[in-house]
Image (cartoon, grey):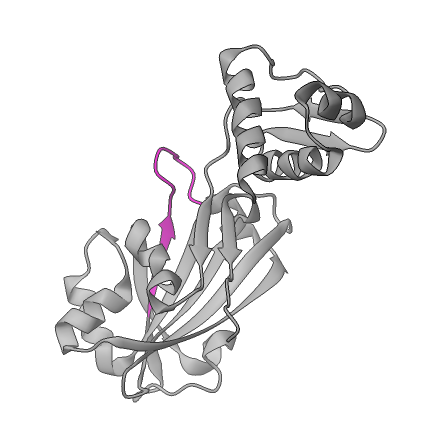
C-alpha cells in the first residue's frame, strides 16, 4: 500500500472512530466520494479494499459500501521473508496446551513418509489466541518424534513453541522449515474451537522443522480462522 492509500485508510478510520461516519451507514458512490475526498477512484478503491480486508467496510454489488465496524479486526500476519519471520507465530503468540497423547505413524496422514525411531510420536494439542481476544484463531497439533518425546514431562500449560523446548533440551537449532498451506473444510471439532461453522473454509498449514543437520524435530498441523490470519510472502529476485 502506498503512502497516499495508507493516509486515506487512516483518514476514513478516524472519521468512523470519531462518530462522524457511523457503523451501519452507507458511504457515497465511489465517483462522488473520490471527488469529495480529492483522490482518484483507483486510490479510493485500494483504500476500500484494505478497509474491507480488516473488517471495517463491506462492499456488495448494487448495495454499495457499508461501514460494519468502528475498528480493524485483530489479524495475525505471518511474513515469510526469512526463517526468523517464518517462526514468528511461536514468537508472538503463546500455545495454550490442551493435552498430549502417543500416536502411530500410520494413524496420521501428515506423518506418512516420515520416520520416528519407535514408529510412535508424541502428539501435543493446543490453541493460539490473539491478544485481547477470548476465542482462539488457531488449533494446532504438533508431532514430536520419539527421540525428543521426553519433553512431555517438562511441558507447561502454555508455551511459546514446542521446537524451542527441543532446542533448549537437546542443544539444537532450527536450520530449515518446510511448509505447505491449503484451503480445507474445517472439521467440526476444530470449528467449535476457533469459532467457525463446521465445514466452513479454513486455512491449514503443515510444517516440518529440521535442525541444522537436517534431522526432523517436529511436524505441526495448524488450522486457522482465515478471517484472523494472514500469510504474507515477500521475495526479492536478484
Q: Residue at x 52, y 28 (%)?
A: 10
| Occupied quadrant, residue 100 | bottom left
Rendered image quadrant of residue 56: top right
Q: Tell me if residue 134 is in the magenta stretch.
A: yes
212 with respect to 82 (left or right): left
Q: Is residue 24 on the magenta stretch?
A: no
Residue 125 visible in the displayed image = no
Q: Horizontally, is 153 left or right of 80 in the view?
A: left
Residue at point 66% right, 34% down? 48
Please name the predominant secondary structure of the magenta segment in the image. loop
Outermost residue to the top: 20
- Furthest toward the right, the residue is 62
179, above or below 49, in the image: below
Q: Does residue 30 appear in the picture of this structure? A: yes
Q: What residue lies at 60% left-to-right and 13% top-to-bottom?
A: 22
Measured from the top left, where is residue 15 in percent x and y? Answer: 55, 17
Question: Closest to the observer: 11 or 21?
Answer: 11
Residue 223 in the image: x percent, y percent?
A: 49, 57
Which residues make up the magenta segment?
123-137
Question: 123 or 230: which is nearer to us?
Answer: 230
- Relative to 189, residue 210 above or below: below
Question: Residue 194 location in percent, x, y?
Answer: 48, 45
Amino acid at each position: 500500500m502506498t503512502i497516499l492509500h495508507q493516509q486515506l485508510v487512516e483518514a476514513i478510520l478516524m472519521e468512523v472512530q470519531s462518530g462522524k461516519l457511523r457503523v451501519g451507514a452507507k458511504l457515497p458512490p465511489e465517483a462522488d466520494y473520490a471527488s469529495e475526498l480529492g483522490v482518484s477512484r483507483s486510490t479510493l478503491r485500494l483504500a476500500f479494499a484494505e478497509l474491507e480486508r480488516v473488517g471495517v467496510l463491506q462492499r456488495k454489488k448494487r448495495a454499495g459500501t457499508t461501514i460494519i465496524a468502528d475498528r480493524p479486526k485483530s489479524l495475525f500476519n505471518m511474513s515469510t521473508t526469512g526463517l526468523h519471520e517464518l517462526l514468528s507465530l511461536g514468537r508472538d503468540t503463546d500455545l495454550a496446551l490442551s493435552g498430549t497423547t502417543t500416536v502411530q505413524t500410520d494413524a496420521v496422514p501428515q506423518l506418512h513418509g516420515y520416520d520416528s525411531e519407535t514408529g510412535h510420536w508424541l502428539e501435543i494439542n493446543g490453541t493460539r489466541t490473539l491478544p485481547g481476544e477470548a476465542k482462539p484463531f488457531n488449533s494446532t497439533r504438533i508431532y514430536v518424534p520419539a527421540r525428543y518425546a521426553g519433553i512431555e514431562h517438562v511441558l507447561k500449560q502454555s508455551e511459546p513453541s514446542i521446537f524451542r523446548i527441543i532446542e533448549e533440551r537437546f542443544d539444537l537449532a532450527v536450520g530449515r522449515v518446510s511448509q505447505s498451506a491449503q484451503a480445507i473444510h474445517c472439521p467440526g471439532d476444530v470449528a467449535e474451537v476457533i469459532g467457525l461453522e463446521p465445514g466452513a473454509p479454513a486455512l491449514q498449514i503443515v510444517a516440518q522443522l529440521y535442525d541444522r543437520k537436517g534431522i526432523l524435530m517436529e511436524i505441526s498441523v495448524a488450522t486457522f480462522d482465515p478471517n484472523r490470519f494472514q500469510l504474507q510472502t515477500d521475495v526479492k529476485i536478484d
